Amino acid sequence: MSKVKPSALPPDTMIGGYRVIRKVAAGGFGVVYLAADQSGQQYAIKEYLPASLASRAPGALLPQVAPEKLSLYRLGLKSFFEEGRALAQISHPSVVTVMNFFRENETVYMVMNYLEGASLQDFIITARDLKQSKVFRESTIRSLFDEILRGLRIVHQHKMLHLDIKPANIFITDDNKSVLIDFGAAREVLSKEGNFVRPMYTPGFAAPEMYRRDASMGPWTDIYAIGACIYACMQGYPPNEAPQRLEKDRIATALSRLRGVYSDNLIEVVEWCMSLDPLSRPQSVFALQKELTREGERRYTKLTVAEKVRLQLDTMVSDTKKSVQKVTGMSVKAK
Amino acid sequence: MKFSVFQVSRKGGRDANEDRMGYCYTRESVIFLLADGMGGHPQGEVAAQLALQVISAMFQKEAQPELPDVGAFLTSAVMAAHRQILRYSIEKDMLDSPRTTIVAAVVQGGLVSWIHCGDSRLYLVRQEELLARTRDHSFLEQQMAAAAGLSFPERVNRNILFTCLGSPARPVLDLTGPVALQQGDRLMLCSDGLWGSLSDADIAYQLSQKPVSESVPDLVESALRKAGDGSDNVTVIAMEWETPDGFESTQGGISTNSINDGVFASTVQSGWLDSSLEDLDDDAIERSIAEINEAIRRSALKKA
């Protein structure tokens, strides 16, 4: 797309009594700023400014919306409100807090607590570059996700799904708390009339049902993403995308390489969460929490020599297949 | 109970998709639903959505886990949907009521029964043979039925229906079944966007060649292609039946045995009606913001 992104508000712009310090992020829905109130207290302020529907010239305050896009713009606004409304009811240390909501510059703003720290994604990238057998320690993974699941449970209790859980949306604060952020994708409204914003999904973390329109989504959809995040914490890389897994599923093989490094139980939990069939996953956060916090001795079953050989062969065979396909220009599955 | 199911809805060349589809099941009973909101009247998509919500809600209430009387359920649920649509139009002071077709099928105890009103169809295909299909409540198809064998001029408009849900006149419903299902039988519900472009023979043949997860998207694609830019909404939901002791499916089908008594699964989306309908004007925006800030205050108080 050649379209220019709408410009962010420049530093020192005043909005709703807050002073913009700088832009911290921009996404499909709008821009997030670091801002401060008169007392100097810092906040994160999210501005509704969908890049596909609105434009704003550098230095300008008011976004421009083409008349033919106005109804979609308003529809998107509605989902922005829904996000605010849902978050407003939730007060939990593991879920980002909304402090204020106001209208200005012909758009709306959501004020949230400003978190200092880094995303889980940043941590994974740093950790995997150390090139050790473990990306994260198992106890770290268990306690991190225990916190996140406590927050997610409250979210689900409010009849809301996050629908975009991924390491980039799990924030680890400098005082070691993990917080679920960015509920912007949680609303599907924008996808209703098709053309412009699909229900947003992140490859690797989105459950197969997210790819199908009208398929049944539920707590198990977020649970798939949690499984994928744990997977990323163990492997250092995101898992294959769901459609790819439906063709050929390599998750089990990939996880078996981690046997002996992580406990059998943790590996099983990830496989359980990432079942392609939604009904085969833990159906509630509670069910998953119970498994993840289970005390008791952990078993580590190392791969046998035979299994290692088989794994290697498997890689070789698939590599050969690939190169044969490349040479012959043929694909096993005509798609 | 085991079956594979696939559903898809495409907008075609229209501005909006007024088709709705879905299925729900308990351990012992499953219902498939499809509604096509009618043009020429306001808010067809609302009528279609309401119909699905009412019927699926009644199914959830009465299938415990089986429906005591499938035929009676189908009739009463469709009538309840009709009344709900009328009630909606009265509450909203509408001059004309929204309207929709409906086709619904229940499978329970290895038997299928279905009901329909309008021109959304059900096809039952066994080994490439079209075993049954619904007769549209259109003037065209009624004439054909009255004088089978005579050909009628093309210009009889197939789109003119004499009954539907939501009209002031009592809807005409056709209830069929129960029919015993056999291993591999395909049951398909579709809107006129599909059958308007493809012949029955094509549909029956294509449906039986591949698993529903492949044949359904293929069918929809070919209907869209054939209709071109002006294509109507095309919506299809189809299932392939597996007898209880048949071979294990490799298609990742649905087995209702894994769910317990009292559990209910549904793909019918709810919540459409209260939120998305009225346009978001300035007052509504102010109201939303006030509500959110009120909720923030309440949460903050709780915390303190």
Image (cartoon, helix red, strand yellow):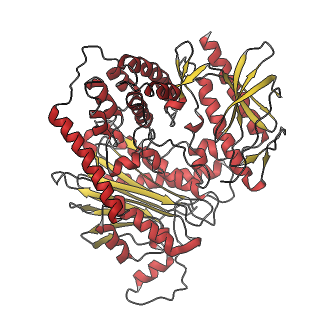
> Residue B72, image x and y in percent?
35, 54
The quadrant of the rendering that contains the C terminus of chain A is: bottom left
**Looking at the rendering, which quadrant does residue B41 occupy?**
bottom right
Determine whether A174 is above or below A239 in the image. above
Q: Is residue A42 left or right of residue B185?
A: right
> Residue A3, image x and y in percent?
71, 52
> Residue A289, image x and y in percent?
37, 22
Residue B44 visible within the image: yes
Q: Measuring 34% from the left and 37% from the top, which residue is drawn there?
A: B263
Q: Measuring 21% from the left and 26% from the top, which residue is drawn there?
A: A302
Q: Is residue B46 left or right of residue A236?
A: right
Q: Is residue B61 left or right of residue A192?
A: left
Determine whether B13 is above or below B1 in the image. below
Residue B54 visible within the image: no
Determine whether B264 is above or below A127 in the image. below
**Looking at the rendering, which quadrant does residue B175 occupy?**
bottom left
* Closer to us: B32 or B184: B184
* Closer to us: A169 or B129: A169
Q: Measuring 76% from the left and 40% from the top, which residue is drawn there?
A: A7
* Closer to us: A300 or B54: A300
Determine whether B133 is above or below A67 in the image. below
